[in-house]
Structure formats: C-alpha cells, structure tokens
Image: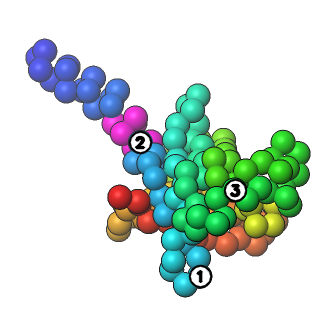
Amino acid sequence: MKTAIFILLFIGVFLPVQSQEEVVGRWENTNEDGKVNSIIKIYEKNGEIYGKVDRIMKEEDRNRVCTKCEGELKNVPIEGMELMKGFKKDGDEFVGGTIVDPKNGKEYRSKIWLDEDNPDLLKIRGYISFFYRTKTWRRAE
C-alpha cells in the first residue's frame, strides 16, 4: 500500500514538471537555407517559459544591437536578449507568450510546442491577427 501511494505521489508531482522541462534547453534557430543563425536558451522563470539569445553564430554579428526594437529592448545587444517571454503550459502547448524578431523589432503573440513525432524539434508559431508563421528549431547538442 505504501508503495502504491509513493508511486502515485511521484507521478503526480514529477510528471508535470518533466513535461515543462522538455522545452527547456538550448535550441538551434536556422535561416531559410537551414544554416544555424543562433542558439536560443529556453528556461523556466516564475512558473513561465522564457527564452534568450544564448549565442549568435557569426562572430562579426555578436555585438549587434536591436535598433528596430521599441521600448526596453531598443538598442539592447541581441546576444543575451530575452526575446521570448510569458509562455504558460496548456496541454501539450505553451501559450500566451510573446516573441520578438530582432531583425524587424516586432513582437508577436506566439505559442510553442514539441513536435509529437520528434521531441528534439520545437515548433514556434507567431501571430499577426489571423495570420501566422511557424518555424522549427532543433535541439542543440
């Protein structure tokens, strides 16, 4: 009986945390040619999912700042920038967050989820009104 209670407690306490941690980690952001532009580090903060630019691959671009961003991100270095924020778990997805595109400075409502066939692929969908674009990031080594 004690073993059964322990197993139920283990499942109830650790499985929700494990599913959130699946998106936590480092992810390769690629361009249209499939070349890795940057590594994004996704992490949990205050019960929500956030992401920042961990590394820009081109050394000559590492000191660039976000000149097109507005507000507190204006002229912030892109490497190290927190560009994803506020994602909350909802089933198999993380929703309610936003993502900033440092190339154009725009912030998009977005959601993220792991590919159901390959947990090493992360889907990122940004919305403008009814339109959306989905990118796929690969888990970094």
Mark 2 and mark 3: span between their CA atoms?
30 Å
Q: Which numbered marker is on residue 21? A: 2
Q: Is residue 114 visible?
A: yes
Find the magenta span and give its range: 15-20
Q: Which numbered marker is on residue 63? A: 3
Other-residue count near label 2 (Cα within 10 Å), few / some / many at <14 / 14–19 / ≥20: some
Residue 136 x, y percent position in the rendering: 52, 69
Q: Nearer the viewer, mark 2 or mark 3?
A: 3
Q: Earlier in the sequence, mark 2 or mark 1?
A: 2
Looking at the picture, which amino acid does disc 2 mark? Glu
Residue 18 x, y percent position in the rendering: 36, 39
- Which residue occupies 63% across, 47% down? 80
Looking at the picture, which amino acid does disc 3 mark? Asn
Residue 40 x, y percent position in the rendering: 54, 55
Q: Nearer the viewer, residue 138 or 125?
A: 138
Q: Quadrant of residue 47?
A: top right
Q: Is residue 123 visible?
A: no
Q: Nearer the viewer, mark 2 or mark 1?
A: 1
Q: Is residue 21 magenta?
A: no
Say which residue label 1 marks. 32
- Left or right, 62 with respect to 127, comes to left
Q: Is residue 19 magenta?
A: yes
Task: Provide the secondary structure element on which disc 2 rests.
Answer: helix
Give the quadrant of the N terminus. top left
